[in-house]
Amino acid sequence: MDKITVKHILENEIQEKEIRTWSTWSCNKSEFPWEYSERESCYILEGQVEVTTDDGDVVSFGPGDFVVFPQGLKCTWKVKQAVYKYFLFG
């Protein structure tokens, strides 16, 4: 299975991908299981998150990170600081 990818992106990439037109999502400090029925791309505006996959991989990300979750991924989200993000499925 594909892995979660995290990279820091700059303003020009944000504009190229039209990220500010995407839907937004927020979540307070919490922990919950999640399964991705389709690929998700997201850009983190606020917060700190640690995601642990069913394979045992731990991925952390925060403000300024562009994160891609592969379709079929099963994981647990641990929101350490309230998160606010733009996201796009597909």
Image (tube, helix red, strand yellow):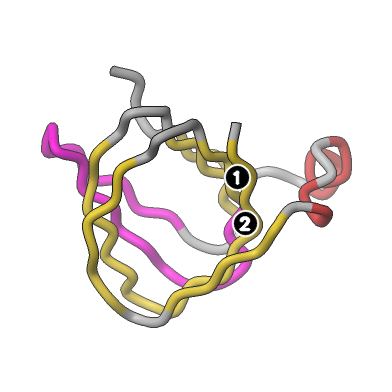
Mark 1, residues whose alpha carbon is within 10 Å: few (<14), some, or many (≥20)? some
Quarter-wise, where is residue 8 in the image? Answer: top right
Q: Identify which amino acid the numbered label 1 is placed on.
A: His
In the figure, is residue 66 to the left or right of 37?
right
SS category of the residue bearing label 1: strand
Q: Position of residue 60 (x, y in %)?
A: 35, 53
Q: Position of residue 82 (x, y in %)?
A: 44, 79
Residue at 33% x, 70% y is 79
Residue at 74% x, 52% y is 22
Q: In front: 73, or 9?
A: 73
Residue at 23% x, 69% y is 31
SS category of the residue bearing label 2: loop
The disc, 2 or 1, on the residue closer to the chain's N-terminal end is: 1
Segment colored magenta: 43-61
Residue receiving disc 1: 8
Residue 64 is marked as 2
Q: Identify which amino acid the numbered label 2 is placed on.
A: Gly
Q: In front: 71, or 83?
A: 71
- Between the residue at mark 2 and the residue at mark 1, the CA separation in whole angstroms equals 6 Å
Indicate whether residue 16 is drawn in magenta.
no
Please identify the quadrant where the N terminus is shown: top left
In the figure, is residue 12 to the left or right of 9?
right
